[in-house]
Amino acid sequence: MMHLFYIVIMVIITSFYFFPFEFTFLPGVNTKMAMAGIGLVLLSVDLAKSHKSVIGKDFFKLSLWALGVSLVCFLSVVYNETYDYTYASYIISMWVWASGAYVVVTLIRWIHKRASVVLVCNYLIAVCVMQCILAMMIDKIPAFENAVNSVVSGLGFVELDTLEEAKRLYGIGASLDVAGTRFASVLVMIAFLVVYLDNTRLRKYLWLYVLSVLIIGIIGNMMSRTTTVGLILFIAYLIYASKIYMLKVHYSTRHLFLWLGVGLLVLIPLVTFLYNTDMDIRSNIRFAFEGFFSLVEKGKWDVHSNEILKNMYVFPDNIKTWIIGDGYMENPYVSDPYYVGPRWHGYYMATDVGYLRFIFYFGLIGLSIFSYFMFLAGKINVNRFKEQKLLFWMLIAVHFIVWFKVATDIFLVFALFLMIDEGENEEYNNSILLNETNHIE
């Protein structure tokens, strides 16, 4: 019983890391920053005790590239004489995420006697399911919404009032494209795990993974349609792993398709009933799957946000901007008190497209350095965890696909796996292949 209690607390702590927010009674300090401070203490204690550290030459190399992102930001800002230092402290941000990840993985190791890729994925899946459930509770239970809003003062990147005005679902720290990107990453994890674990004694939990996909895939899309990236990769990976494109189903995915079929048989009538009886849910479902409704009702795929996105594809008109950027990431009317140029809605040049925002900010030089940093963060994990390398290639794909839509990154995901020791991960992998009578903490 105590073990289950520890796991529940661990899910909450992981959520503090994965979806950070500020408490009303602790303004200016979000949960990520608090965990980073604890992480530095834990790391210092471990080093003092001469424990083996997972922060080695790979992490040092990664830090150098993060420093490169910060330096090219300074160069662009100084050259362009602007005041937008959004990514000037990226090296610090990287270490804050890494320090917070160290806390999460250390506690997982304490609870389960070891840390592993599978265990970290399981906690992230639980966190995203929890956030989806919380989002529905906040939306449907006014007393719960008031209780949450009285404790949560802000999400760091968007105000609660903005979310409520836009009538967008939100969890505790989870909203908009930031949540969508992380949901997409977790859907990719589920896609890998349902195939990878099917030949282990953990296959008995396959129905939980299928349930998680359905919850995150539907409610996650209500919160942010960026979640669709993960759904598409989930389906693509299942097609690849099941060999269904060869008109046969591989034995390792038969249980999965059985549970998916059962889940859809239960889910479709339930969603149909709620769609026809609850106007709020009807509106959220239509928002989440607007393209499909448009295809059925109008005969063509039409998503309002996609039309807006098309207008955001604007490109630099001079060589200087292409090379070193204009030094603006945010709207200059917010970041630069001396800016007197054209006004734009939203961000600089009225674009939210990740690749373009980085080009306008610090040019192709900065974009190239930042891109390699993110690729390296994933590639280090590919090299360290051979059995799960396909998972990390898919996570790398999530990151670079999302940049076609929005400027956010998933280093916080890679950071968690960077804190896992290769040996303990292999030990865990071997343990779940044992017979059903063996027990693992």
Image (spheres, grey):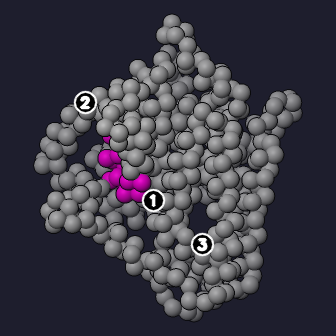
The residue wearing badge 3 is 358
Image coordinates of residue 107 in percent, x first then y, are 64, 31
In front here: 319 or 408? 319
Amino acid identity at mark 1: Asp
Q: Residue at (68%, 80%) from the top-left corner?
A: 324
Image coordinates of residue 382 in percent, x first then y, are 64, 43
Image vertical order of residue 99 relative to residue 372, above or below: above
Left or right: where 167 falls relative to 387: left
Start-end of magenta stretch:
214-229
- Label whose residue precedes the other's in the sequence (2 or 3): 2
Q: Residue at (42%, 41%) from the top-left corner?
A: 240
Q: Is residue 172 visible?
A: no
Label 3 CA crowd tier, 10 Å (few <14, some 14–19, many 20+): many
Q: Are marks 2 and 3 in contact (CB under 8 Å)?
A: no
Amino acid identity at mark 2: Val
Spatial CA distance of label 3 from label 1 is 17 Å
Q: Is residue 369 visible?
A: yes
The residue wearing badge 2 is 262
Q: Are marks 3 and 1 in contact (CB under 8 Å)?
A: no
The residue wearing badge 1 is 177
- Residue 392, located in which quarter of the rendered image? top right
- Label whose residue precedes the other's in the sequence (1 or 2): 1
Image coordinates of residue 1 in percent, x first then y, are 49, 15
